[in-house]
Amino acid sequence: MLKFALKNMAVKKVKIILIVLSIVISASVGILAYNISKQVDNGIKSTAAYYDMIIGPSGSSTQLAMNTMFFTDTPLGTISYDYVERLEADMRVNKVVPFTMGDSYNGAKIVGTTPDFLDGKNVKTGEMFSEAFEAVVGSAVAKKYNLTIGSSLITSHGISEGGTTHESTPLKVIGILGETKTAYDNVIFTSCETVWAVHEHGEEGTEEEEHEHHEGEVCAILIKSKSPSHYYSLKTEYSKDSSILVINPSEVLREVLENVDMSSKIVYVLCIIIVIMNIFVISVITLLNMYDSKKEISLMRLIGIGMKKINLLYIVQNGIIGLMSTAIAFFASRLFLTLIKNYVASMGIVLDVWKTYPFEWAIMAIIFVISVLPTIICTVSMARKDGISE
């Protein structure tokens, strides 16, 4: 039966290809929409949960949060390191982490901070930076540029390629992070003192470059307070300073997630529309296929093949088509994730190509049922009639 079904599919390959394409499009779009929205949602939630406050220059709350936590966009500017020292001496604060950015290595952004910023991240090879001009690189950066312990990094001014190079102050790789499947994989980490020293000895940037970093300035400060009451008192106090911006990263990123969620819902609606259209297309093609097969069915009846076996033949045939189509759709979605992975990484979104959620399998199961259902309905209907007399 299986062998005959495959031969029958080969004879009607044009119609089969149309059905397969229809199923692949609907299934892959649905899988992609769900997978990307879930990965973005989980990534933002896990990153935003650690710190309850970020202080930076006045400006956009979203830009400050995304730049500091996902290394996207450009920094808002700089604020005095005095804020860091004041917060470190504050009994209401558990942890204070300075953050500065302004240089890059072949497009990979360089972040000046302290080892505390990498808490929870595993240094797979080497050790954590402790002295000026030492650097720890993300796993993706190390892999892309074949960096090893001892590699020398000639950085350039600005967070994109093409800026003035700092040839007199190279950074030395002393550690490589293990893969985190987050934006940390695409960044190089060093101390704030290194960033200050590089700009002190380097040439001034051009007007197009974002901004200069001077000793004693940082782009942002990440804070973890001791308790909710301490958080609110800190926020009230520092919000009075009009020269700085005080945000709660979870609140800001929740707003971002709401926009992402709205976009996801729009995509889901489009997916539903595509699925409904494909149900119609698949049903019509199946009906036409069954109509064209009347003579074939009559011939099989004449040689003594019962309708149950004929029905089974077409159910097996369309079952193969549905299974093959959903499998292709799954791998097509992974291919698309691979193609866009590097592009979205520049926006601070890291996609795990092979990360799969249970609901994705549910989507494929639904698409499979939809692909086979019209055939079952047609064959059951035909089983009640005499194939020769028709």
Image (tube, rainbow, N blue to C red):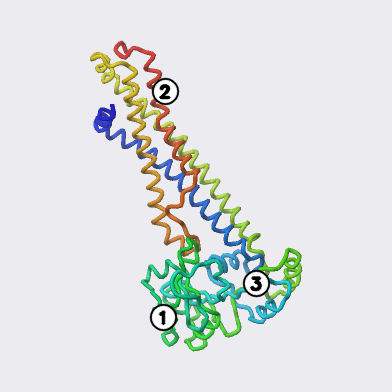
Amino acid type at circle 1 is: Ile
Task: Write the residue at 44% across / 32% down.
Answer: 370
The residue singled out by tag 1 in the image is 154
Give the CA separation, mark 2 to mark 1: 67 Å
Q: Position of residue 320 (x, y in %)?
A: 34, 34
Q: From mark 1 to mark 3, how far is it between C-alphas?
A: 32 Å
Label 1: how many Cα within 10 Å (few below 14, some 14–19, many 20+): some
Q: Are marks 2 and 1 in contact (CB under 8 Å)?
A: no
| Foreground label between 1 and 3 | 3
Between disc 1 and disc 3, whose residue precedes?
A: 3
The image shows residue 90 at horizontal and vertical percentages of 72, 76
Q: CA distance from mark 3 to mark 2?
A: 65 Å
Q: Which residue is mark 2?
A: 377
Q: Mark 3: give few (<14), some (14-19) or many (20+) Cα within 10 Å.
A: some
Which is nearer the eye, 130 or 162?
Answer: 130
Element marked by disc 3? strand
